[in-house]
Image (cartoon, grey):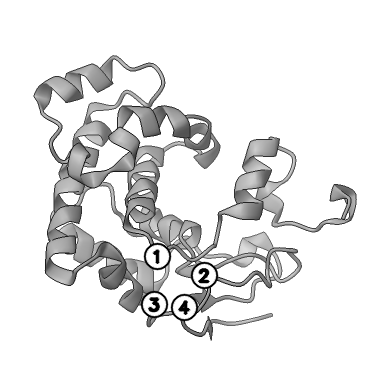
């Protein structure tokens, strides 16, 4: 289908083909892999105060700098590693965010130890299946929800940093815990991973 005939979420249009591809192929796809969960947690934390486009352009630099987003390896980063990362022009050189990424990797491993996987921990916050919202325009989409509030609070209590409710809701959107594609978006009907639950339909329509 020619792009001119494809309707997308308005935030993804007119910026860059990479941004559009992210919307088309990743955003809102249910994530069940712990490495991918950690990747998005790290990137969403790095985004705080910045645009997602800024971070998306640096994604492969982050992958290189943070050991392929392997939480076991990142958890072993020491002060020298942080100093090295502060000199890496390919990422956002913010000491608080870098140190938070390392600390969060350690907390991530603790959740894996307690629940068997981060995936098993996080999905119950949305009842085990993606929340299918029914937004018609971008302005209807909230910055936070009760679910993101609850997940944010629990992560903070476990010692995570840069996990405010707004950041966590962005994480939930990215990893498909919620589907916030507009009703008019061509991605809307996309199915999640084979054999994983039934999608829930929740929240108001207009």
Disc 3 is placed on an element classified as: helix
Q: Residues within 10 Å of mark 1 (few under 14, many from 20)?
A: many
Q: Quadrant of residue 61?
A: top left
Label 1–label 3 contact, CB within 8 A:
no
Write down the residue under mark 4.
Answer: 196
Label 1–label 4 contact, CB within 8 A:
yes
Q: Position of residue 200 (x, y in %)?
A: 51, 84
Give the residue at the far front of this rendering. 194
Residue at 64%, 81% in the rendered image: 205
Q: Quadrant of the C terminus?
A: bottom right
Write down the residue under mark 1.
Answer: 32
Give the alpha-carbon distance from disc 1 to disc 3, as whole Å. 14 Å
Disc 2 is placed on an element classified as: loop
Q: Position of residue 7 (x, y in %)?
A: 80, 58
Is 196 on the left-hand or right-hand side of 201?
left
Write down the residue under mark 3.
Answer: 126
């Amino acid at each position: 289908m020619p792009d001119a005939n494809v309707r997308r979420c308005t935030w993804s249009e007119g910026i860059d083909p990479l941004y559009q591809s992210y919307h088309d192929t990743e955003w809102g796809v249910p994530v069940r892999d712990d490495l991918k969960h950690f990747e998005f947690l790290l990137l969403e934390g790095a985004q705080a105060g910045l645009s997602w486009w800024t971070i998306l352009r640096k994604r492969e630099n982050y992958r290189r700098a943070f050991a392929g987003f392997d939480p076991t390896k990142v958890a072993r980063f020491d002060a020298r590693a942080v100093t090295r990362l502060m000199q890496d022009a390919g990422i956002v050189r913010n000491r608080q965010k870098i140190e938070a990424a390392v600390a969060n990797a350690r907390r991530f491993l603790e959740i894996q130890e307690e629940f068997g996987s981060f995936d098993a921990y996080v999905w119950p916050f949305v009842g085990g299946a993606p929340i299918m919202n029914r937004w018609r325009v971008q302005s209807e989409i909230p910055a936070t929800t009760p679910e993101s509030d609850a997940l944010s609070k629990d992560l903070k209590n476990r010692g995570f940093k840069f996990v405010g409710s707004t950041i966590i809701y962005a994480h939930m959107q990215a990893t498909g815990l919620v589907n916030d594609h507009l009703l008019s978006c061509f991605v809307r009907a996309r199915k999640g991973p084979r054999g994983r639950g039934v999608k829930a339909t929740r929240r108001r329509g207009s």
